[in-house]
Amino acid sequence: MSEIISEIKKYVSELKIPGVNQSLKMHIEEAYKFDKSYEEFLRDILIEDYDVRKENGRKNRIRNAKFPYKKYLDELRVDYLPQDCKRRFKELKTLSFIDEGRNIILAGNPGTGKTHLSIGLGIEACNRGYKVYFATVPSLINELKESRSEKKLYTFEKRFEKYDLIIADELGYISFDKEGSELLFTFLSLRAERKSTIITTNLSFDRWNEVFNDEVLTAALIDRLTHKSYVINMNGDSYRIKETKEWLEETN
């Protein structure tokens, strides 16, 4: 019997069926013990492999998304969020905006939960099978510039078309030069009304020109990004300060 199991494991390895190898011996023992038919035995093995592949895929999507840290929607204190976000939270949580190719713009003062919410939505999207990519806006612009200098910009843009959701964090902390503004405009415009993008920013729309330094380009970008989008007012008291106060109260 052990020789047969070893032989099966060899073929399983060659065929790249990881879920079978992990519990093959257990399934064989159960088949003998409960007198399972060949069909039942095969079904149980395939279910095991399917579950392993599904879980590995979920983990890979989260890892490949490049989140700076993990934040989950279930950890989010909804009562701490600004009023406009509280009102729309349940709808955002459904992720219907991804299937509809709609954008989300989270705009408000620092510390109100914009990045936490965007990462939480991103991880939930990964869990449900969507491909997600997270980047700060400055790092995204650097990637675009490097791709252009290496004459790989088209390849870069085609690769990013495959993502169901891109999270562009921290628009407004650093202003861009003309090249960076034009590259970001082109990149985000290509996704408009086709694929979803979440943008977090500490600037109101009337101040975006401070970042892009081009009134015409800024107006065009705002028009494309906000069309049929969720524009959520994230101005409010600091989410972090509220958490810190609660923690201090609990420890005293």
Image (tube, rainbow, N blue to C red):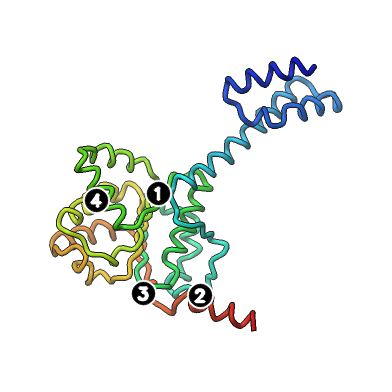
Badge count: 4
Which residue is tagged 2? Answer: 80
Please say if the residues under marks 2 and 4 sit with CB atoms less than 8 Å apart: no
Which residue is tagged 1? Answer: 133
| Amino acid type of the residue that numbered disc 4 sits on in the rendered structure | Ser
Residue 112 lies left or right of residue 183; in this view the side is: right
Secondary element under disc 1, as helix, strand or loop, is strand
Residue 63 lies left or right of residue 202; in this view the side is: right
Circle 1: is it few (<14), some (14-19), or many (20+) Cα within 10 Å?
many
Nearer to me, 100 or 130: 130
Splitting the image into 4 quarters, where does residue 26 fall?
A: top right
> Which label belongs to residue 109?
3
Residue lying at 22% horizontally and 48% vertically, measured from the top left: 145
Please say if the residues under marks 4 and 1 sit with CB atoms less than 8 Å apart: no
Which residue is tagged 4? Answer: 189
| Amino acid type of the residue that numbered disc 2 sits on in the rendered structure | Tyr
Task: First in sequence, mark 3 or 4: give its number.
Answer: 3
Splitting the image into 4 quarters, where does residue 247 fall?
A: bottom right
C-alpha span from label 1 to label 2: 26 Å
C-alpha span from label 2 to label 4: 33 Å
Task: First in sequence, mark 3 or 1: give its number.
Answer: 3
Task: First in sequence, mark 1 or 2: give its number.
Answer: 2
Does residue 166 sit above or below 23 in this rendering? below
Residue 108, horizontal then vertical, whole percent: 35, 72
- Nearest to viewer (mark 4 / mark 1): 1
C-alpha span from label 3 to label 1: 24 Å
Circle 3: is it few (<14), some (14-19), or many (20+) Cα within 10 Å?
some
| Amino acid type of the residue that numbered disc 1 sits on in the rendered structure | Tyr
Residue 160, horizontal then vertical, whole percent: 33, 43
Task: First in sequence, mark 3 or 2: give its number.
Answer: 2
